Image: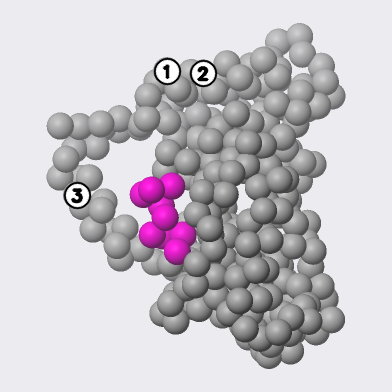
Amino acid sequence: MSTKSFQVVFTGKLCSGKDRREAIAELANRFRLDFKRINHLLSSDRVIVKRCASQAEAASLVRAFAKTGWEAQVHESPAVTGDEKIAGKVDSVKEAFRTITASDDSCVLKVPTHWQAMEGLNDGAIIQAGSLVENVFCVVLSQQVSLSETDESLNDYCSAQLQQCAKQVSSGVVTRQTEKLPPEEGGGCVGEITAEIGGVPVAYLVACVRRGNRIFTQFLWCELREYRHKRKLLRKVSASFDVLAQSVGDREAQPHAKVIPLY
């Protein structure tokens, strides 16, 4: 048995008769994009913004872009056989990772090699990365704290981050309360949230780790329908977090959960 997938490609071309300034404003409003994300779309050559399981889903997204005044196209990917699927699963287990260093050189995170360093996901983040093709993203924030060095205080802090994130995103719901991570996953605490971005259900993995007088908070997210399959990968990325120095200077990032994927 074979399956096909359908890529939605943003061409960067205006629909006939559409004013460019108005179209940019409508694109930003419809997909909740900031200036940096808009600039990335318009300055890149034919960006693949989504891979869809059905042609109908892909066509729906193309129509959504057209309503904002922009042309998009659907490209059908080659059929994948059952054997190829199995091979793909084996390859994914051996997926290569690369290291991304924080903007303040305080920590590192290992992400799949096809993920890219990004901007505009969260202005206070020290690490921003992800894949526009797979719609999976992560950010890392840090904050100086004066909390007691106990598991309970870290758990309370992570719980507060979950609640804050849930309040800042549309239809945010805490679906998994904070729990302690085992040492092999970096220690710390982790919880989960679901929300909607531009009408698309998404799921967040939120992890907090304490190092010295700082707490590092990781937000990793993808579409809700893909979360069950990507959860293991997101946990692996989160567990790879490491601090480069005990003292990371005076820079204090605000732990806001202003995390908005493209679609």
Residue 115 horizontal/vertical position (percent): 52, 57
Q: Is residue 234 in the magenta section?
A: yes
Q: Are marks 1 and 3 in contact (CB under 8 Å)?
A: no
Residue 13 horizontal/vertical position (percent): 67, 23
Tell me the kind of residue under disc 3: Ile
Helix, strand or loop for disc 2: helix
- Left or right placement of residue 130 versus residue 145 in this view: left
Tell me the kind of residue under disc 2: Ser
Question: Which residue matches tag 3?
Answer: 86
Res 26 → quadrant: top right
- Left or right placement of residue 23 versus residue 133 in this view: right
Res 53 → quadrant: top left
The residues bearing labels 3 and 2 have C-alpha atoms spaced at a distance of: 30 Å
The residues bearing labels 1 and 2 have C-alpha atoms spaced at a distance of: 6 Å
- Left or right placement of residue 230 versus residue 107 in this view: left
Q: Residues within 10 Å of mark 1 (few under 14, many from 20)?
A: few
Magenta stretch in the rendered image: 227-235
Principal SS element in the magenta part?
A: helix
Quadrant occupied by the N terminus: top left
Question: Which residue matches tag 1?
Answer: 56
Q: Is residue 159 above or below residue 260?
A: below
Q: Which mark is residue 60?
A: 2
Res 76 → quadrant: top left
Residue at 54%, 63% (x, y): give it. 178
Helix, strand or loop for disc 3: helix
Residue at 23%, 58% (x, y): give it. 90
